[in-house]
């Protein structure tokens, strides 16, 4: 648990949804406009919808659990389980659309990363 999100729990029967590239671009503009984030981590890259949107705001490191995902197949991301630690990078920002069923677990771990 985290003081910011004391009741953060996974949603039962949560599902996965892929972000439309236009939505990712709009979110990146709003979330990162004017921010100085030299290293951005996209830990659940999936098909890579967030990657083009994030590249305009800093250096992007992407990872994905599924080795068959589009971003991995195109060599835009590395195979990595975002629940694993320790990280070998120190991201200043994390932008992603995580799998809903483990989103709470992931967020708890990411909130503990000192550089974010």
Image (tube, rainbow, N blue to C red):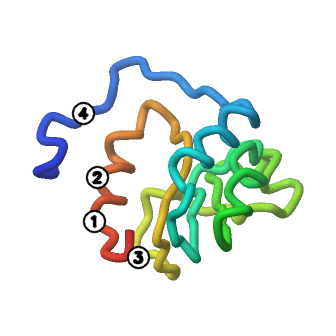
Comes first in the chain, label 4 or label 1: 4
Q: Secondary structure at mark 1?
A: loop
| Tag 1 and tag 3, C-beta contact below 8 Å | no
Residue position marked by numbered label 4 in the rendering: 9
Q: What is the crowding at mark 4: few (fewer than 14 residues within 10 Å), some, or many (at least 20)?
A: some
Comes first in the chain, label 2 or label 3: 3
Q: Secondary structure at mark 3?
A: loop
What distance separates the C-alpha of mark 4 from that of mark 3? 22 Å
Residue farthest toward the top in the current orientation of the protein: 13
Res 72 label: none
Residue position marked by numbered label 3 in the rendering: 86
Residue at coordinates 50% horizontally, 65% vertically from top-left?
35
Comes first in the chain, label 1 or label 3: 3
Q: Seen in the image, is 83 located left or right of residue 8?
A: right
Q: Position of residue 23 (x, y in %)?
A: 67, 32
Comes first in the chain, label 4 or label 3: 4
Residue at coordinates 51% horizontally, 81% vertically from top-left?
88
Q: Position of residue 78 (x, y in %)?
A: 71, 65
What distance separates the C-alpha of mark 2 from that of mark 1? 7 Å
What distance separates the C-alpha of mark 4 from that of mark 1? 16 Å
Image quadrant where residue 115 sits: bottom left
Q: What is the crowding at mark 3: few (fewer than 14 residues within 10 Å), some, or many (at least 20)?
A: few
Q: In which quadrant is the C terminus drawn?
A: bottom left
Q: Nearer the viewer, residue 64 or 49?
A: 49
Residue position marked by numbered label 2 in the rendering: 108
Q: Secondary structure at mark 2?
A: helix
Residue at coordinates 84% horizontally, 63% vertically from top-left?
75
What distance separates the C-alpha of mark 2 from that of mark 4? 10 Å
Q: What is the crowding at mark 2: few (fewer than 14 residues within 10 Å), some, or many (at least 20)?
A: some
């Amino acid at each position: 648990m985290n003081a910011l999100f004391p009741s953060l729990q996974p949603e039962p029967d949560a599902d996965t949804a892929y972000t439309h590239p236009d939505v990712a671009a709009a979110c990146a503009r709003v979330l990162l406009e004017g921010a100085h984030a030299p290293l951005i981590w996209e830990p659940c890259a999936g098909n890579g919808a967030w990657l083009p949107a994030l590249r305009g705001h800093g250096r992007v490191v992407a990872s994905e659990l599924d080795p068959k995902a589009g971003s991995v197949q195109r060599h835009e991301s590395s195979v990595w389980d975002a629940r694993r630690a320790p990280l070998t990078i120190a991201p200043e920002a994390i932008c992603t659309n995580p799998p809903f069923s483990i989103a709470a677990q992931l967020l708890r771990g990411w909130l503990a990363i000192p550089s974010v």
